[in-house]
Amino acid sequence: MIVAISRFRASPEEADGWVHRLQERSRRVDGYKGFLGLEVLRSFERSPEILLVTRWRDRDAMKAYFQSEDFQRAKGASASQEDATFALYEVVAT
């Protein structure tokens, strides 16, 4: 299994808006073969860190989504987060 994590900080004024948009997401990714789930995490800090955690069956499934128009649209909506980071992990034990 592959886990992809995007993280960024939001100002206190923007945090609720980000959380709301992520809660109301289009859910198009849910229909992609090999997609296993998505969690949105928010830290308790004054300027919270927001994490989007997606789980994929394998790298090929994730790559197919990343090459899709749906991903390009989703990526464009979050392009304003200049401090965002992205990392991929392979699950090696549970």
Image (cartoon, rainbow, N blue to C red):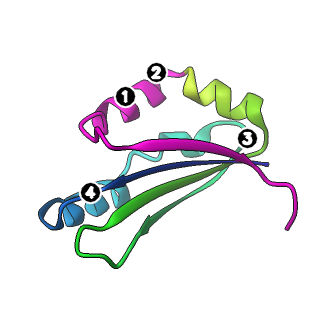
Q: Which of marks 4 and 3 is in front?
A: 4
Q: Give the range drawn in magenta.
A: 68-94
Q: How far apart are marks 4 and 3 (CA)?
A: 26 Å
Check disc 2: other Cα within 10 Å, few if <14, some if 14-19, many if 20+: few
Q: Does the magenta stretch include residue 82?
A: yes
Can you tell which of label 1 and label 4 is closer to the viewer?
A: 4
Nearest the viewer among 73 and 45 is: 45
The residue nearer to you, when weighing 86 against 71, is 86
Q: Callout 3, which amino acid?
A: Gly
In primary-sequence order, the first of circles 4 and 2 is 4
Question: Splitting the image into 4 quarters, where does residue 34 fall?
Answer: top right
Q: What residue type is labelled 1?
A: Arg
Dot 2 falls on a residue whose secondary structure is helix
Spatial CA distance of label 1 from label 4 is 16 Å
Query: Which quadrant of the structure image shows residue 20?
Result: bottom left
Q: How many neighbours does mark 3 have within 10 angstroms: few (below 14), some (14-19), or many (20 or more)?
A: some
Query: Label 3: which residue?
Result: 34
Task: Identify the mark at residue 18; answer none if there is no mark.
Answer: 4
Secondary-structure class at tag 1:
helix
x then y, percent, for residue 48: 30, 68
10 shown above or below 66: below
Position of residue 39 measured from the top left corner of the image (x, y, whole percent): 53, 62
Residue type marked 2 = Glu
From the image, tell me which residue sits under label 1.
73
Image marks 2 and 1: residues in contact by CB distance under 8 Å = yes
| Cα distance between the residues tagged 4 and 2 | 22 Å
Is 55 contained in the magenta span?
no
Q: Examine the rendered structure and indicate whether residue 63 appears above or below residue 15.
A: above
Circles 2, 3 touching at the beta carbon (< 8 Å)? no
- Residue position marked by numbered label 2 in the rendering: 69
